[in-house]
Amino acid sequence: MLRSVPFIVPAQPRLRVRPPVGDAWLHEVKFDGYRCQIHKAGKDVVIFSRNGREFTDRFLEIRDAVLTLPCRSAIIDGEVVVCNEDGIPNFRRLHFRRYADQTLCVWTFDVMKLNGADLRPLPLIARKQKLAPCCAGTTVRVCGILNPSRTASSSLLYADRAASRASCRSASTRLTNRANVIG
């Protein structure tokens, strides 16, 4: 049934010298993983790559976690990440499928459809507010917003990998403790 639901081509980020500023912009952690789109309908879940390739068989743990979401149907944008016990993403382990001793998780950014309703016309912040309670109490994590009022002088672009990892560890700990963190 779900394989007939069309893949929604996601918005792709663009590389810029400075992060955008203003109240119209939200800033989120960029995790080191695979972008994914998750389709759930009843007891059926399909996980797609950012290019629309089916990833479900590769991430059965995530499929099982999505089945616990308290909704009939959903299309969710997220990122599959392998984190160690300190919350530091490890892309190499994800890519080479070596994560038996790591934590496989999905960080969700957006819900495009929920229980049959197309939410894409709503502002992103409103969609995030609908996503948080949908994931609360499950192992599916919601990516919070990094202070939406930040300006270009704020350091959202990291100069080195160590700084990026420290930020992810901090965000991972903060968001894992409260799955419904929005801001």
Image: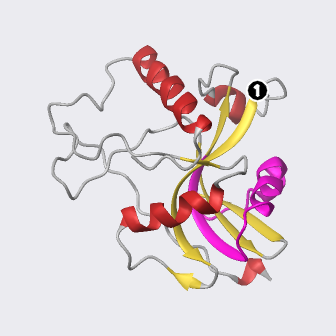
Percent coordinates x, y for residue 107 in the rendering: 59, 46
Percent coordinates x, y for residue 25 in the rendering: 25, 54
Marker count (numbered) = 1
- Is residue 51 visible in this depiction of the protein? no
Percent coordinates x, y for residue 183 in the rendering: 39, 46
Residue nearest the observer in this picture, 32 or 135: 135
Q: Residue at x 56, y 76 (%)?
A: 113
Q: Which residues are magenta?
A: 50-79
Percent coordinates x, y for residue 181 in the rendering: 49, 46
Q: In the rendered view, tell whether residue 129 sits above or below residue 152.
A: below
Residue neighbourhood size for the residue with mark 1, other residues' Cα within 10 Å, grouped as few (<14), some (14–19), many (≥20): some
Residue nearest the observer in this picture, 44 or 161: 44
Amino acid found under the numbered disc labelled 1: Gln
Residue nearest the observer in this picture, 54 or 85: 85
Task: Return the residue at label 1.
Answer: 102
- Report the side of 155 relative to 28 (left or right): left
- Is residue 124 visible in this depiction of the protein? yes
- Report the side of 110 relative to 2 (left or right): left
Q: Is residue 73 magenta?
A: yes
